[in-house]
Amino acid sequence: MIDMATRIGDVTLPNPVLTAAGCGGTGRELGRFFDVGRLGALVTPSITPSPRAGRPAPRLTETPSGVLNAAGLQGPGIEDFLTRDLPWLAEREARVIVSIGGGSVGEYAEVARLLGDAPGVTAIEINTSCPNVEDRGSMFAAHPSAAARLVRAVRASAPRRLPVLAKLSADVTDIVGVAMACADAGADGLSMINTLHGMTIDTDTLRPRLAGVTGELSGPAIRPVAVRCVYQVHAALPEVPIVGMGGIRTGLDALEFVLAGASAVAVGTATLHDPSACVRILRELDGALKERGIDRLADVVGLAHKPAGSLHRRIDPNVGLAGAGGGATEPIEQETTQ
C-alpha cells in the first residue's frame, strides 16, 4: 500500500489529487461519474459575494494543446452556495476547498467570514487573479503588496482552523516574489499556476474567437510553465505546501509536479473530455510510485531539488516504467530514503 496522504496547513488529505477551481463544478457534475468523496478534495469554482452572469458567448475555444475560456466567474453567489451546494457535498463526505473571488479586498474578506461559520469547508483558496476595482482593474496577483494585502484580510476573516491558500498567476514578472509576499502575509499554502492570459483570432471571420476578445489559457500547453513555477517557488519556500496545476493529464504528469515540489495536484482541463480524469490520474500516480519502489508520496515531494546521492537505490532489472501513464521503459530502481 502506498501512503498517499498529504498535508496543507493543519489539514491532512487522504490523497493529493484535487479538482482545479471551475473545472469540476460544485460536485454534482462529477458526482454522476464517481464518488467525489474519493478525491483528496474538491475545489469549487470561485465563489463571489453576489450572483454573477459571467461574460457573453462565445466564451470557450480550443487551441493547440489547450483551451481558452472567458467565463468571467459565473456563479450564483455565496448565499446560494451555502444553502444548496455545500450541504450536497457534506452529505457525500467530500473535502471541500472553496475558491473565493471578488472585486475588492472587502468582498473577499466577507466571503471568507461567511465560510468560516459554515460546516464542511476544508480550506479556502484565494483567486488572486481577479481584477481589483479599487486599483484600476489591476489583478491582485500582479503586485506582491496587493496580493499580500488580500491574503492578510482573508486570513484575518477566516478561522485559524481553515488553511488559506493563495492561487498565483504566472502572468507576472516575479512569481517567487509574489509567493513570498503571500506566505509572509499568512498564507498556509500556495496554488499554482492559474491560467495564462491569451487570445486567438478566427482567420475566416477575421475577428477574435471569444466575445470578450481575450481569455484564459489552460491545458497541456501551459504545463512546462507551471512546473517551472512550482520548482522555483519550492526552492525559495520549501516549507510552504504547494498545490501544483496546469495541464495535468496523466499520473506521470502529476508525479512531475510532485518532484518539482508540489504536495498536491489539481486536475482541470482534462476533466472536460474525461470526467473521471481525477480518479484515473490518482490510480496512475499510485502505480507510478509502486513501480519506482516508493512507499510514501511525501518522500518524493521536491525530490528533483535534491542531489543525486539523496536516495539509496536498489536496481530491479525486471521492472520497467511502462503502464504508469506512459514514459520510458528502462530498468527502474527501488528507492529507500536515507
Image: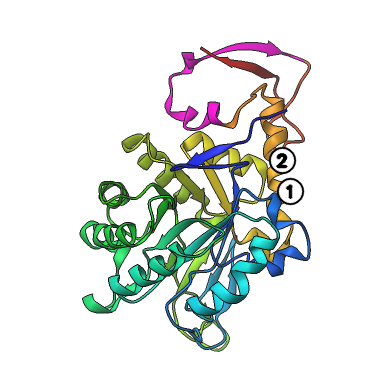
The disc placed on residue 280 is 1
Q: Secondary structure at mark 1?
A: helix
Residue 61: x and y, percent? 59, 75
Q: Quadrant of residue 233?
A: top left
Instruction: Look at label 1 and name its amino acid.
Output: Arg
Residue 80 located within the stretch drawn in magenta = no
The disc placed on residue 34 is none
- What's the residue at 69%, 46% (across, down)? 281
Instruction: Look at label 2 and name its amino acid.
Output: Glu
Residue stretch rendered in magenta on the structure: 298-317
The one of 316 and 85 positioned closer to us in this rendering: 85
Whether residue 262 is visible to the viewer of this picture, yes or no, is: yes
Residue 308 located within the stretch drawn in magenta = yes
Quarter of the figure that contains the N terminus = top right
Q: Is 270 displayed left or right of 181 in the figure?
A: right
- What's the residue at 41%, 70% (across, down)? 111
The disc placed on residue 284 is 2
Q: Looking at the image, do the residues carrying marks 2 and 1 touch, with CB atoms under 8 Å apart? A: yes
Residue 152: x and y, percent? 27, 57
